[in-house]
Every structure is written in C-alpha cells, then in structure tokens.
Amino acid sequence: MKKLLLCSLIGFASPSYADFIGIYGKAGVWNAGFEGTVSGIKDKIKREANGQEIPNFETRGLDNDNQITGWVAFEHPIPFLPNVRLGYTGVESSGWSTENISTDKITVPYNGVNITYDGSQPIYTTMQFDALDGTVYWEILDNWVNLDLGLTVRKMDGDFKETIEETALPTQQFGGADGCGGLEPTTVILGGFISLPGCIRPQTTAVTPIDILLPLIYAKAQFDLPFTGTYVAATVQGISASGNSMVDIDLEAGYNFSLTVMDIGASIGYREATLNAKDLDDLYAKDAKLSGVYGALSVHF
C-alpha cells in the first residue's frame, strides 16, 4: 500500500513544481495541554491487576504550557525530485495530581479475613519529549490553490515520569513481618481500625523512556486570497497500523507581505496531535491528545 501511494505521489507530481529555489521557515509558540491517558506498560499491567484505572492527564494535574514549534523547508524547480522539510516540536509539561492516586493495593490476611490496604499518595507527573520530523513532498498544485503530498518520518525522544511520595505500607509488602530491612518503621491502619506493623517506602520515580520512530502520510493544502497576502492552510500527518495510531492536524490563517529580498509573515492557528498505542516501545496511550492554539512568524527567501 505504501509503495502504491509513493508511486502515485511521484506520478501526480509532474504537472506542477516550484519556479525558483526557495527557503521557507516558520517558528512559533504553541499553548497546548494534554488530554487522555498515558502510562508505562508495566504500570498499566500492575494497575489492571489491582483493578485500578490509569489516571488521566486531568487527574494528574497537567495544565496548558507554552511549547516551541517550527519548521524549515527547501523547494526547488527540478521535476520529480521531492522538496524537503524539517520540523521540530519541543514538549514539556508537569503537575501534581489533583487527588491521591492509589499506587499500591495490598491484601493482608487478618484473623482469617483478607483486608485490602490502599496506599494512595499524590503523584508528580512529567511528560517531556522532542519530536523531529523529516518530510519529503511533491507540489501537486502551485498557484493560488496549493497542494503538497508526501511522507514524513517522525522521531520522538524523551520520557514519561511518575514520582510517588513516600508511602506507608504493611510489612507484607516487603517480604513478611520480619522488619523493614532498613526502611523507617511505622504503623498502618487496615479497614479504618486495625493497626499493623508497616514500613515507609521512600519517594520513588518510575521512568518510561519515549523512543518512537513513526512513518506518517503528509498532506498540506493552502488557499491564497489573490492580491491580499492573506491565506488559510491545513496540514495533516497521520498513520494507523496494528492498533497504534497518530494523527497531527494543523489549521492556520495568516498574512504575508514582501520586502526587497524576502517575504515575512505572521499566523495564528490550532494544532491537535492524537496518539493511541497498545504497546509502542513500552508506552501505552489511549486517546492521548496534545492540543491548543499557537502564534507564529514566518520568512521566505
């Protein structure tokens, strides 16, 4: 299917191509916030075994943050050869959970009855990654209506961290009632009234690396309002395979004006990137979305 698509792109590319060599660039600030659910696979398995739900980004307390985004493209007048575009997005967001989140559910036998102890604690979550796009594309239309089609390879590097506050747990969690093995002893309460020996587990941080390489279909359509410098554009990149999917949609409106040696412009837009992953290099995501408005400046030589 991919080979057929690539052949189609090359075949359709011949009617239109740039008249001159051009370098285009855009940089902006994206005020974006997370929605949905992300977790490491190990944490997902542990929570499901305890009958727990994975906390979503709202519960984790992540708010909108300003992210850096931009791209640079090189276009040329050589038929059949693709144009090249490099894009970058840097994302970092963190927050404390809006409620105590259950990280340990331990069943403790007491006088022949099993009692569940819930070690709920606040969680500090950090989501950080850099996304680098390499795109080759062909200009299908190049006039007041512009259409580009191509392929993108997206490399995402970073990590997803969960830091759990120190937690009081029954000694059974540490291998029995023989002591705390160097940890600080304490008392835990089961069922609201039963006191048992326990230990304080220190603050811990679980790190899930983000190391993802994805091929994406690339398409951009732009409508230039003749003689005004005003335009509207939509860029879509996406893929879906084997239960994993990513869709990145960018809608913008802008204005360009010409100087002696270059064009400069400004735009505002809305961008939404959605990820679903069953097990993408140890990362689980369900309807995980990063979305928001942005403002950007552009230049064309």
Image (tube, grey):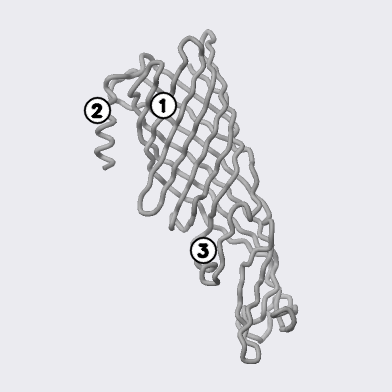
- Dot 1: few (<14), some (14–19), or many (≥20) neighbours within 10 Å? some
Seen in the picture, residue 195 relative to 282 is either above or below; the reply is below
Q: The residue under label 3 is which amino acid type?
A: Lys
For marks 2 and 1, the one nearer the N-term is 2
Where does the image place residue 73, in percent across and percent down from the top left?
A: 44, 26
Identify which residue, 267 or 132, lies in the foreground. 267
Q: Nearer the viewer, mark 2 or mark 1?
A: 1
Q: Which residue is mark 3?
A: 44
The reply to whether callout 3 and callout 1 are in contact (CB within 8 Å) is no
Say left or right for 111 vs 301.
Answer: right
- Which part of the image, by quadrant, shows the N terminus? top left
Where does the image place residue 127, in percent across and percent down from the top left?
A: 58, 50
For marks 2 and 3, the one nearer the N-term is 2
Number of numbered labels in the structure image:
3
Residue 140 position by quadrant: top left
- Dot 2: few (<14), some (14–19), or many (≥20) neighbours within 10 Å? few
Residue 5 position by quadrant: top left
Q: CA distance from mark 3 to mark 1?
A: 39 Å
For marks 3 and 1, the one nearer the N-term is 3
Seen in the picture, residue 167 relative to 244 is either above or below; the reply is below
Q: Which residue is mark 2?
A: 11
- Dot 3: few (<14), some (14–19), or many (≥20) neighbours within 10 Å? some
Q: Which residue is mark 1?
A: 221
Identify which residue, 142 or 183, lies in the foreground. 142
Q: CA distance from mark 2 to mark 3?
A: 46 Å
Q: The residue under label 2 is which amino acid type?
A: Gly
